[in-house]
Each structure stands twice: as structure tokens, then as C-alpha cells.
Amino acid sequence: MRRLPLRVLVASVVLGLLTGVTAVVVAAGGDERPAASAVSPGVESEAVRLLRAWDERRARAYARGDPAGLAGLYVPGSRTGAADVAALRAYVARGLRVTGMRTQVLGAAVLRRTARRLVVEVTDVLLGAVARSGERGWTLPRDQPTQRRVVLVREDGRWQVEEAYRAD
């Protein structure tokens, strides 16, 4: 049991690295620049609402320990999705659930938008995550703001993350 907190710390670092899924997918070519559609404070664009809803579904999958539910948020074959699912499985294998996970969007810019594809550059931070085993809980280290490119693809009326990359 003494080793559990170290495992929790390692898993939380992986979770922090994967948090970027929340916000960026790079279109082929990857040389696009942010458009003038940056989200101003207090104004919630459709893209930010979509990202927030996606993040909430991701947080629910982590809280339930549901790798299949998490995988459904990603396009099949997504490397980002595979890494995120592997991180969740590592928590579940240790008997842990991650609760309280919230992603705060600090800024966002739509780089590309079509009917089926959305590329967003986003700056976000993961807050409030706690790894739990029964009644015990360990607050995971606080994330730092990260800028990412998130590519979302619309299939059968729902948006899935294709990939997410650090933008810096």
C-alpha cells in the first residue's frame, strides 16, 4: 500500500499530459494559423461549448472507470485516444477512479471548420482531479495551462477527437 501514492503520482502525470485532448486537432498540412474567431472573455462559442461537453463526457468515463466509454469519444485508431484509454486502464488496474476532473478553457481559436471537421487551438488547464480507492483519495497534482491543437471529426451526428497535439 505504501507504493500506491507513487503510482498515483505517475498516473496523474500521464493524465496531465493527456489533458490536451480537450483541445486540438491538426488538419492535414498543419500550417494553419488561428483565425480571427478567438473566443473573447465571457463569450462562449459553439466550439468551446462542444469542447466543454466533450470534456464532461471524458470526466464521467474516468469517474466510472469506463475505458470503453472513453474510447467512444475518439475516432477509431486515434493515437491520442489509445494513450488516454491506456492511462484510464492503469488507474482501473490499481483499483482507482479519477473524480472531480474539470477542464477550464482559458482561450480558444477556431483554425478550421467544415461540416465534418473542427480544428481548434485551445489553452486549458485540468483542475480538481482526485484518484480514489474506496473512501481514500489522493489529490492529483495541479496541471499547468497548456496550449493544444485538437482535431474533432463529426460522424453520425456526434463529434469525436481524432488527435490532440501540444501547440507549442
Image (cartoon, grey):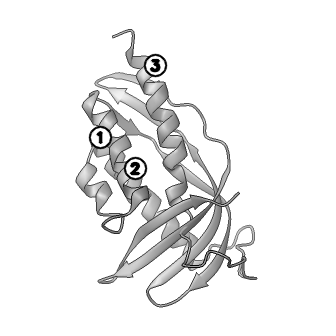
Q: Which mark is residue 84?
A: 2
Cα distance, mark 1 to mark 2?
A: 9 Å
Query: With respect to residue 69, does 10 lie above or below?
Result: above
Question: Measured from the top left, where is residue 54 in percent x and y?
Answer: 43, 64
Helix, strand or loop under label 1: helix
Residue linked to disc 3: 6
N-terminal label among 1 and 2:
2
Q: Residue at x 68, y 79 (%)?
A: 32
In terms of depth relative to the viewer, which is nearer, 60 or 88? 88
Helix, strand or loop under label 3: helix
Question: Measured from the top left, where is residue 130 in percent x and y?
Answer: 45, 33
Label 1: few (<14), some (14–19) or many (≥20) C-alpha neighbours in 10 Å: some
Helix, strand or loop under label 2: helix
Question: Measured from the top left, where is residue 95 in percent x and y?
Answer: 26, 28
Cα distance, mark 3 to mark 1?
A: 17 Å
Q: Which mark is residue 89?
A: 1
In terms of depth relative to the viewer, which is nearer, 88 or 43? 88
Given the image, on which type of amino acid does mark 2 rest? Answer: Asp
Given the image, on which type of amino acid does mark 1 rest? Answer: Arg
